[in-house]
Image (cartoon, rainbow, N blue to C red):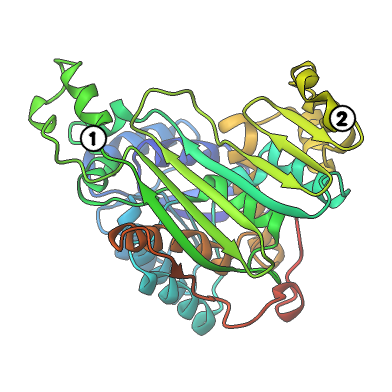
Amino acid sequence: MEKFRLGIIGLGCRGRSMTGLLAEREDCNITAICDEYADRCDSMKAKLAEHGHDPAIYLDYEKLIAAPEVDVVFVFSAWENHVPAVVASMKAGKPVAFEVGGAYTIEDCVLLCETYRETGTPAMMLENCCYGRVEQTLYAMKNADVFGELIHVCGGYHHDLREEVSMGLENRHYRHRNYRSRNCENYPTHELGPLNVLLGIGHGNRFVRLSAFASKSAGLDTYIKNHPDRDQTYADGKWAQGDVVTTILTTSEGQTVRLSLDTTLPRPYSRGLEIHGTKGWFSQDNMSVYTDENNVEADHFKWKNFWGNYSEYEEKHMPKLWRDYLDAGVKKGHGGMDFLVLDAFLSAVRDGSPMPIDIYDAAIMMAVTPLSELSIKMGNAPVEFPDFTEGIEDRETAEGKYKLF
């Protein structure tokens, strides 16, 4: 088997874990690594040597992309670097996979799409949650008409990040500077990727407008004051990011979508997925399905007896991808979905198939960040959502794209 020659950009926490997964693949040879911090490169080079890789080290990502020993690029760097590195990779004609995160401007999203149309170079956002076991099963349930017509869906990034953000300078984490300077839905794709698949966004359905709302910022100040080991100069009331951001989107088919970002208050992790359809409902927070078939209106006081009944539906509807994966033994990375998303990208590159989460899908998700920032600045006013596909409603037909989900 001919091996992919990989170049890795970004060796922070996420970059280290994903590079570790790639290093274990028999079809990959990691030939180059890059980070602006030399110590990260040295540490990763030593780790990769344990797996038989001997990558060249670059401190400039553009030089890595241009390097002749690199055929495929992975971008795991800070949010600000995603668009420049992806655009440079596409212009160099090298297939590129990149980590999740919002864009900084709508112009960045347009640039991604224009560069793809100019170059035709494959590019894929590594939205691993699209490959989650629950999410994949929900796609199958939707296709089996368990929920009927989808009317309203919800999702969120609910993750206590107070330590990560407050220690961002010491740990060289980009979230610190973003939370100091921006107020927006800064991380929409973990929930929005699966919701877009369910609603067919970008594939006949599209978002038409968005409104966003931000609470005050108090969580990080309180957290830092309660932890004397933190840098108290940042308990200063100058965090721009609201503690909870709620974003409402409407679709061309008349559905509504509610996203929530909740990362600076005490709470358990959740992606808060909810599905509201004409035949049934699902909640990820209590892993429950409610349908006309198993409940009637008068039973609403008995509903708690059904909490946690999702496993019955999973047994029936879990797709072959995950059944085979479980039989083979789930690989590493966020319950296995990291392995699956990496495998999907590399398989598409090898087969010459369209990307499962292509540049248009990425642009749609990433656009939520600058649009939410604009709406909040305008007093929660609705803003129009661009059509990045330029009117191409069915890319499966227009570009020979197939549906993996």
Find residue 64 and report its horizontal and vertical position in percent.
35, 60
Which residue shows up at 56% across the image and 69% down it? Answer: 360
Find residue 347 and report its horizontal and vertical position in percent.
68, 56
Tally of marks: 2
Q: In the figure, 307 relative to 283: above or below?
A: above
Mark 2 secondary-structure assignment: loop
Which residue shows up at 30% across the image and 28% down it? Answer: 162
> Is mark 1 in CB contact (under 8 Å) with mark 2?
no
Q: Which residue sits furthest left?
A: 233
Q: Nearer the viewer, residue 140 or 96?
A: 140
Q: In the figure, 140 relative to 220: above or below?
A: below
Find residue 49 and report its horizontal and vertical position in percent.
42, 35
- Identity of the amino acid at label 1? Gly
Please tell me how crowded label 2 is: few (under 14), some (14-19), or many (20+) other residues with Cα within 10 Å: some
Left/right placement of residue 403 relative to residue 271 reads: right
Left/right placement of residue 232 relative to residue 86 reads: left
Q: Nearer the viewer, residue 224 or 300?
A: 300
Which residue shows up at 82% across the image and 37% down it? Answer: 318
Mark 1 secondary-structure assignment: loop
Q: Which residue sits furthest front?
A: 298
Which is in the foreground here, disc 1 or disc 2?
2
In the drawing, what numbered circle is on residue 295?
2
In the drawing, what numbered circle is on residue 168?
1
Of the image marks 1 and 2, the number of the one nearer the N terminus: 1
- Identity of the amino acid at label 2? Asn
Left/right placement of residue 293 relative to residue 325 reads: right
In the drawing, what numbered circle is on residue 65?
none
